[in-house]
Image: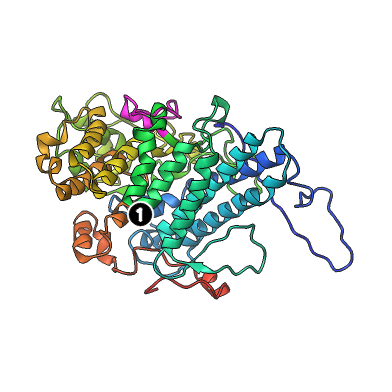
Amino acid sequence: MKKIIYILFAVFLLNACEVTVDNPNTITQATFWKTETDAQYGINAVYNMFYKPGTYSRWLWFRLDLTSDEGFSQSPWAELKEWTDFRYNNYNFWEGNRWTYRDCYEAIFRANQVLQFVPDIPFANEGDKERILGQAYFLRGLYYYNLALLWGGENKSLAIVLEPSTPGMQPEGHTGTEVYQQAISDFTEAQKLLPEEWNAANKGRATKGAALASRAKCYMQLHQWNEAKSDLQWLVEGEGKKYYDLTVNYADNFRSNTENNVESVFEIQYSDVNKAPAGDGDFDVDPNLGLNRGQFFAPPGIGWTDGEIRPWLVTEFKKEKDLNDAYDIRLRYTAFYSEQHLDFPDNERIYGEVSNEATWNRDNWRGRVFYRKYSSEHFRDFDDYHNPTNVRLIRFADVLLMYAECIVESGGSVSDAVAHVNRVRARVNMPVLAVNHSAATSSKDAFLKRLQMERTLELATEGQRWADIKRWGLVDNQAGIDELKLRDPDFNNFVIGRHSRLPIPSDEVNNNPNIEQNPNY
């Protein structure tokens, strides 16, 4: 599936009083959705949303990584910077809010088309139809999860749309909890219909394991620990165990030549098959199928540097040495920073240059920490916009750490949970928790607090942190905000009861009386 150019289509509904004139070159609802090929094109169009700037190609990372205490922005684009430090003025700001909101619902619209029309298409093999429907449920659930995570709250601020939308539709608003529940319902249907694995030609399509892990993420945000634990158990100890493991080499999770490996539970397939000036628009020919994030987060002179890592993350990594008295290898593959050539002295390179004092003494690099995961470090030109490195949206290491959290939160044995954390640490040659964090091996509270940092060290800058700090309640009370402030001064602007969710775009609220604005906006 890596090199497939997903076919984008549009369905137009044309109404006339007495005379209907059809354009023979236009695909309409009446002429499409007839064959198995149409159904396949339909589901591919839902996957196509992964390549749109509003979602995982670009702007979603600003919300997931830069809003958390791991990242921040010093962008000269003032409004872009403000939307990473909780200064939300124009709720319709396209790049910071409205684009991602719109694209989530566009993906849901495409999935709804598949779910409405594909059941009526005759298939030679009903199993093929079920797999297409399962993927549509999975992808719709994924975007409802994102909507609940970013915009969901106590108000009825988010629409739940389960059929293809039409002009003038004004759906009812729902709370964040209700949207999570819809995502859970979608993942439930998906896991019934999806295969446990695909053949090589279809690598990257959603599987049963991906649906269960995603449903567990929803359950965890709702603190339904037993339900989440049951889902994750299938991947860690149940029937799905044979499909997943940790890679021997941590770095293999971020390289373009080690994709779709045993650690990947769900992976977005990126490609540089279409070079510049490939565009991102809905009707662009030979569209960009690459990851844009690297260009936007790369150091000055290489990319736009709209996102950077907070230095505390480097400090945290360096608090503990591995079994060979060396620094945690995960640091090397998470960040570019000024002492890197000293901490990892085997000819470290940054975007083709040898990393040394001269590199880091540049006025615009000194003292800063830059993103390395999913960077375009092997490029030096504007082909960075077409980074072919796949994003491992759900890794098995994440599953193990979530499973450990659920075991303890549901009243299970701390020692059982510790074993899963130690498995993740062992892969990078770090000592077992008992060596440097003995309290975490016997106390529930101490374990859960240490797990917060274990998740950061393993998953930093992979878009997991915002969901984590919301789930742990760090944004719901002053003690949590004070902790976050110590790591990220942007949280000095954080208002409890307001900034744990984004504002609904103003146009949406103004055009649909059933949608409420989020509190305190």
User: Residue 355 versus residue 36: which sits nearer the camera?
Assistant: 36
* Mark 1 neighbour density, 10 Å: few (under 14) some (14–19) many (20 or more): many
Q: Quadrant of the N terminus?
A: top right
Which residues are drawn in magenta? 245-264
User: Residue 397 versus residue 282: which sits nearer the camera?
Assistant: 397
Q: Inspect the image, locate mark 1, and give the three-letter code of the amino acid beneath it.
A: Gln
Report the residue at 31% width, 57% height from top. 470
Left or right relative to 102: residue 28 = right
Q: Quadrant of the C terminus?
A: bottom left
Residue 131 image offset from top left, x and y in percent = 59, 38
Q: Is residue 12 magenta?
A: no
Identify whether 488 is placed above or below 155. above
Report the residue at 38% width, 57% height from top. 76
User: Residue 175 versus residue 391: which sits nearer the camera?
Assistant: 175
**Which image quadrant is residue 347 in?**
top left
Residue 132 image offset from top left, x and y in percent = 61, 40
Name the residue furthest right: 19
Which residue is denoted by mark 1 in the rendering? 221
